[in-house]
Image: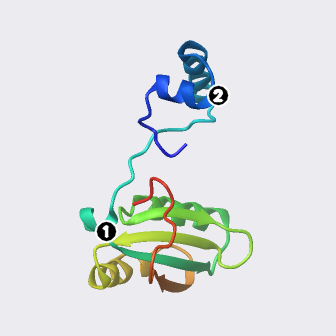
Amino acid sequence: MQDGRLANTELADLVGLSPSPCLRRVRNLESRGVITGYHAAVDPAAIGRGFQVLLHVEMALQDHATIEAFETEIARIEEVVECRRMFGHPDYLIWIAAADLGAYEQLYMAKLTSLPGVARTNSQFTMKTVKPAPGRP
């Protein structure tokens, strides 16, 4: 569903239920963790985060302590929108939203290059967003 603000009566009409059973089903999906939240779609440029970067990270060290330290530090960086540990190469895919190239360079030099265990990085800049992910800045 693309509209998280849809009223229960409208949702009930769309799925062919009366409002009470529809609301029970939604609450059931929420309590079971199927519905994990409701999000607003935000224009990244409007909040000063219009420069999107996909950072590939390869780790030099793969021991438990280094991985935990890296993940703890990456989670603290405000500009990191999403971080995924991958099977294979690269070890991590990290989505970053910064104001512009200068802001990304500053972040890269000040924080990203000093993360624990990092061997190599590769930055890919977004040319054009063809289909945005819902809820992602």
Q: How many marks?
A: 2
**Residue 95 image offset from top left, x and y in percent:** 48, 69
| Residue shown at 65% from the left, 74% from the top | 91
**Residue 81 image offset from top left, x and y in percent:** 44, 62
Report helix, strand or loop for mark 2: loop
Q: Which mark, by number, is residue 9?
A: none
Q: Quadrant of residue 31?
A: top right
**Residue 41 image offset from top left, x and y in percent:** 39, 53
Q: Is residue 48 above or below residue 21?
A: below
| Residue shown at 25% from the left, 63% from the top | 46
Nearest to the observer: residue 90 or residue 126: 126
Callout 2: 10 Å neighbours few (<14), some, many (20+)?
few
Nearest to the observer: residue 114 or residue 48: 48
Q: Is residue 90 above or below residue 134?
A: below
| Residue shown at 35% from the left, 84% from the top | 109
Callout 1: 10 Å neighbours few (<14), some, many (20+)?
some
2 and 1 marks in contact (CB < 8 Å): no
Which residue bears the numbered disc 2?
Answer: 32
Q: Quadrant of residue 63?
A: bottom right
Nearest to the observer: residue 68 or residue 86: 86
Nearest to the observer: residue 70 or residue 85: 85
Colour mode of the rendering: rainbow
Q: Please name the amino acid that badge 1 sits on.
A: Arg
Distance Cα–Cα, label 2 vs label 1: 33 Å
Which residue bears the numbered disc 1?
Answer: 49
**Residue 74 image offset from top left, x and y in percent:** 46, 64
Tell me the quadrant of the picture where the N terminus can be found.
top right
Q: Please name the amino acid that badge 2 sits on.
A: Arg
Q: Quadrant of residue 78?
A: bottom left
Q: Residue furthest top?
A: 20
Tell me: 93 left or right of 115. right
